[in-house]
């Protein structure tokens, strides 16, 4: 990535994943690079195939990445289903590791997000693709 060679970085990410070296970050970083290279379908398959090797803490960010990849590929049904799963986890108290806030990052900055804010964000993300489906039908 430092040398701005996306193809070579993907090869190195695969090597890291296959050798069990920092699989969480390798899988997430590789999927982001693949998305930038218009290889979103391949990134989805990589996450589906290797997420079981990632820590429990990495699962939420993998879900968020999958939602973006589904959106890029036009897989609205999969996007909606994953967003509904995230809402269900929040309602069951399984999100945020039982806490009422979590630390999130955006553009390099950290901030606190409440459960209510996360639910609102997810509901907006669920509503938009559902409206598109309604309009298309």
Image (cartoon, grey):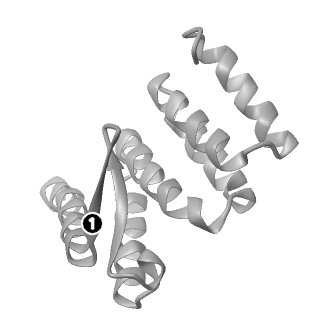
Residue 30: percent from left, percent from top: 60, 34
Q: What residue lies at 49% left-to-right and 63% top-to-bottom?
A: 60
Q: What residue sits 21% from the left and 77% below the top?
A: 116
Among the 4 quarters of the image, the one containing residue 100: bottom left
Q: Report the residue that reaches farthest toward the right.
A: 19
Residue drawn at x 52%, y 54% is 62
Report the side of 59 relative to 109 (left or right): right
Query: The N terminus lies in which quarter of the figure?
Result: top right
Quarter of the C terminus within the rendering:
bottom left
Residue occupied by mark 1: 113
Count of numbered circles in the view: 1
Which structural element holds mark 1?
strand
Whether residue 118 sits left or right of residue 136 in the image: it is: right
Please name the residue shown 28% across and 77% down the image: 115
80 vs 106: above or below = below
Horizontal and vertical percent position of residue 21: 80, 42
Q: Nearer the viewer, residue 104 or 33?
A: 104
Residue 88, by quadrant, is bottom left
Q: Between residue 89 and residue 78, name the one nearer to us.
A: 89
In-image side of 57 versus 97 (left or right): right
Looking at the image, residue 61 lies above or below residue 38? below
The percent coordinates of residue 80 (x first, y second) are 34, 65
């Amino acid at each position: 990535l430092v040398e701005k060679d996306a193809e070579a970085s993907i090869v190195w990410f695969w090597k890291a994943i296959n050798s069990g070296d920092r699989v969480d970050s390798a899988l997430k970083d590789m999927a982001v690079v693949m998305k930038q290279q218009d290889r979103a379908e391949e990134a989805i398959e990589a996450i589906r195939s290797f997420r079981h090797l990632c820590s429990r803490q990495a699962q939420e960010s993998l879900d968020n990445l999958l939602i973006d990849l589904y959106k890029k590929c036009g897989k609205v049904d999969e996007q909606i289903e994953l967003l509904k799963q995230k809402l269900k986890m929040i309602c069951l108290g399984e999100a945020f590791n039982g806490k009422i806030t979590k630390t999130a990052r955006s553009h390099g900055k950290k901030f606190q997000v409440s459960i209510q804010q996360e639910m609102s964000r997810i509901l907006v993300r669920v509503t938009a693709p559902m409206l598109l489906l309604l309009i298309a039908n």
